[in-house]
Image: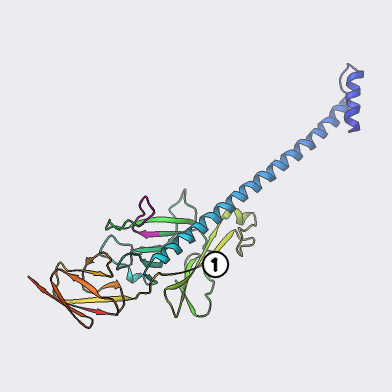
Amino acid sequence: MKIWLYLLIRIEQKSKGFTLLELLIASVMTFFVVSGVGFAIVIMTKDNITSQVSGDLVFNTTRAADFITDEIRQATFISTNSADIPTSTVSCAMASGEQFVIGLAIASSQVNVVYYTKTPPGSPWLGPSSIYRCGPPLNASGQLDLTPANRTKSILVDSITTNATARNETCASGTTKFPASPSAGFFLCVNNSNPNLVELRLTSRSDKLASDGLGAGRNSASSGNYRVVATAFTRAASGVATLNGSGTCTGVTVAVDGRPAINFSSGMSLVANSSRAFVFSPGVWVKTGNTYTGTGGSLACTITASF
């Protein structure tokens, strides 16, 4: 402060300007002031970017977990077997590079919603992996549009980690891990005594946070990861029935529990258990145990349900 006052006095007392020493001192002081302000701006900008990245990671991961658990609660059946995916419509069957995680039957007699992991196609999606959803699209009201026969495949959330620590997590005693060897940080722990009760594990990752040595919470210290654990169960317990037919069964449809009727094909699987009655049409059908016999017109069909 004294130096600045001295310089001001010199200005008033002299009209010859500053000496070289005075200019040098002023330049050095200006350099330190500007450097300090610039450093503070850089730090604040970096902290703001990190905070935004962390916030986006937490928000997107949490919303994805909420969406999946909400659909699980709407389902009547949970499948951990990709063989349960029907092939009679546009298929959600797994292709190369896709790993099946969970299948759901929502307002349907068959698995019609599938979640799986896959490497994203690129910008704007971020890797190293993503969670995809295949199933009926949502309408403007946020409800499943069950009208189209086809299924749509879309990315639910990106930035899913492939870190070995997240993939190799173990499930609690009394539960089974599906898939047993996940390719990404998304898997289930299914209750052994009640397969309709599952624990969802989802871990996302930000390379930006990892490079800064930061995490986004939830046991993610210095890893750039954010981990969500959620428990969900279906609204009704169901199993899978396999229907095998013989005779002339052309044009036969089948419905269970008032769900939409679907075309019958021998060997098909439906979401049902032994206490449920199948409704076949057209024709007249007689039920004997788990065997249904249909007659009428050219129909002469016998269908047996195995549970």
Is 46 positioned to the left or the right of 298 in the image? Answer: right
Is 7 positioned to the left or the right of 46 in the image? Answer: right
Residue 307 sits in quarter: bottom left
Tell me the residue that label 1 is attached to.
Answer: 166
Regarding residue 300, the answer to whether it shows in the image is: no
Report the residue at 62% width, 50% height from top: 51
Residue 284 sits in quarter: bottom left
Query: x, y percentage for residue 159?
Result: 51, 56
Q: Amino acid at mark 1?
A: Ala
Query: x, y percentage for residue 194?
Result: 43, 78
Whether 36 is drawn above or below 66: the answer is: above
**Residue extending farthest bottom:** 289
**Residue extending farthest top:** 15
Residue 14 lies in magenta, yes or no? no
Return the residue nearer the eye: 193 or 178: 193
Disc 1 is placed on an element classified as helix
Report the residue at 61% width, 62% height from top: 220
Query: x, y percentage for residue 242?
Result: 27, 76
